Image (tube, helix red, strand yellow):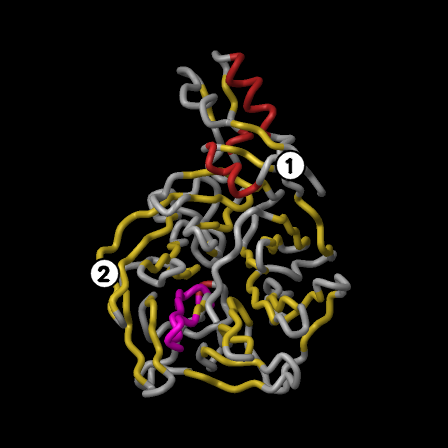
Amino acid sequence: MNGTGVLDVSSNLSVLGSNFTRPILESYASTKVSDNPDASNFIEKLKYTNFLVYNQKFYNIIGTNPKLEVLAKADYPFAHEGGAYVAESDEVFFSSNRLDNQKTQINKINLSTKKISTVIPKDPIFFSNGMCYYNGKVIICSQGKQNVGGSIVSLDPISNEVTTIVDNFFGLKFNSPNDIIVSKDGHYWFTDPSYGYEQGFRDAPQLGNYVYRFDPSTGSIRVVSDDFIKPNGIAFSPDEKTLYITDTGFFDGTGEYDPKKPHAVYAFDVNGSIIYNRRIFAVVDVGIPDGIKLDFEGNVYVGAGDGVQVFDNSGILLGKIIIPNGAPNLIFVKNTLIIFAETVIYSVDLKMLGAFYS
């Protein structure tokens, strides 16, 4: 699906009437309104639009004529998590979804040629997940497998050599590390939910659903938060004074959902290795907030069940980039937002530069 449609919804859907319904796992466009024809007709337009404007500031991001382009397609979920941009080769590395529940694979796309290739690491990376680029290496969350704990590893993008960075918390195995960033001071911050156990490829957890900070210069590792049901995406503001973490507790590892559990983004203030002043930043209305990225203005881009939801730094929804079947993850390459959507990779050129962590 390539698309250019833009629809301003900022003042049209505040009142739907006394009789409306929407399935909890479906998008706003699935809402049925029986006693408000104007609202019903407007909602119908949502089904055919790629860019929804909820606040006029969204035009500062997408411009007046944005285009959603297809970069690559496959007949299996080859593009699920990641990514990591390697500027020297103009390649983006990313992870597939689980394949036959036995493994994931690491893929890469050359942005110049659009060629997709599979990366074969020289040592196993079990159920690869989130990743980032730092200091010449692709940093990857290895979720582990039965009897093998999760770990954080680095992959040399040229030689495919694998080096383990950290694989335990004082002798206890990690669960299934999900997403990671590296701060400007070289510290690794990562989330570690227990999805691997719930999905059947990891043994029973020895640790909680924690968020960690690892200092490779000293070997110091500490839990910075234990307040999550399922910590998932993680990202800093451009000045690294705010840390954003998503909680996807709404879904368990089997795909069952509980609307009373979080599908939200939380913000924390940062002081060295301490995060504090936890606060709700945003709740996504479709699915869960998976991957999360920021631009240099501090706007927050969240992969969700209906695509990419974009918030300003106060948590106000500015707009959405609609992706069929949702967008688990995303990455900025300069001012291009690359969106991973399982069987499709999309891109859209924006008016904002992405914030980088390298």
Residue denoted by label 1: 65
Residue denoted by label 2: 276
Q: Of discs 1 and 2, which sits in the foreground?
A: 1
Answer whether residue 26 is visible to the viewer in this image. no
Q: How far apart are marks 1 and 2 (CA)?
A: 40 Å
Position of residue 160 measured from the top left corner of the image (x, y, whole percent): 63, 83
Front residue (pair 75, 108): 108
Q: Is residue 53 above or below residue 131?
A: above
Span colored in magenta: 182-197
Q: Is residue 183 magenta?
A: yes
Position of residue 277 measured from the top left corner of the image (x, y, whole percent): 22, 56
Q: Which residue is drawn at 73% across and 66% down?
A: 116
Q: How many labels does the image show?
A: 2
Position of residue 244 measured from the top left corner of the image (x, y, whole percent): 36, 57
Q: In the image, what residue type sits under mark 1?
A: Asn
Q: In the image, what residue type sits under mark 2?
A: Tyr
Position of residue 220 measured from the top left corner of the image (x, y, whole percent): 30, 83
